[in-house]
Image: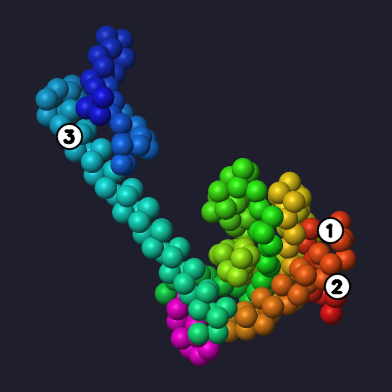
Amino acid sequence: SSTPVLTKNEHQYNRISAKVSIENTIVGYLTILDYQKPFDEDSDIKFASLLCDVLSAEMQKSRLNKKTQRALIEDFMTQLLDKDIKENEIIEERARFLHMDLKENLYVMSIDVSRFNPLHGPLFYFISLVEDMVSGTTAIIYDKKIVMLISRSEDNPLEGKSLNRLKKLLKTNKLKAGLSRCFYNLKDIRSYFRQSVKSLELGIREKSKQVIFGYEDYA
């Protein structure tokens, strides 16, 4: 039942328990104890129900905000890769507005998903795994690839160790990736995307056992 339930206990605090739901899916539980004063059964059950409604509404709003934020970032990165935005000032302003918090060193990694097996899970879940595994990453689908914009500070370079988990994930899913050289201006992302695609193509052509091919290895 979605109605809060009062459970009485002679030896411990009485409690009101209720479910927090979004679109008929339970996303959490609310428990209230009569720690400071005894429950007024009718009014406190109504209060618990109201509190669940408020929590549900706020969680939906938060989820919507995240979806909106994600869509705006994906649109921005697509425009950059398409070269639809070229002015530095506009690019910097958009990045600030979207709270992208980019560091000094930028890289592009492209993952070929033409052989991605949906039995391993939906692609959007795979993208979220990739973002979690490589810190400072924003990833989108572009040109039939997962394109990762990786942002790193000077004291946190993109090195082999930081890519180990990603390498294991790629091997498990039989996927390959190409990595660009480091660059410093978001305006240049399209050129470095091309670098990542070129290194990916060369690595696949070589039939190398590696899963990540760096442009530095082929330049």
- What is the C-alpha distance between the residues marked 2 and 1? 12 Å
Query: In which quadrant will I find the N terminus?
Result: top left
> Which residue is at a point 31% across and 10% down the rendered structure image?
11
Instruction: Locate residue 111, reporting x and y percent.
Output: 68, 62
Query: In which quadrant will I find the C terminus?
Result: bottom right
- Which residue is labeled 3 in the image? 47
> Which residue is at a point 63% across and 65% down the rendered structure image?
145
Whether residue 62 sits left or right of residue 180 in the image: it is: left
> Which residue is at a point 87% across and 60% down the rendered structure image?
208
Please say whether residue 86 is one of the residues in the magenta stretch: yes
- What is the C-alpha distance between the residues marked 1 and 3? 59 Å
Mark positioned earlier in the residue sequence (3 or 2): 3
Instruction: Locate residue 16, reporting x and y percent.
Output: 25, 24
Helix, strand or loop at label 2? It is helix
Relative height, residue 18 to residue 211 (above, below): above
**Part of the protein shown in magenta:** 85-96
- Which residue is labeled 1 in the image? 210
Looking at the rendered structure, the kind of residue marked 2 is Asp
Mark positioned earlier in the residue sequence (1 or 3): 3
Q: Which-is-in-front pick, marks 3 and 2? A: 2
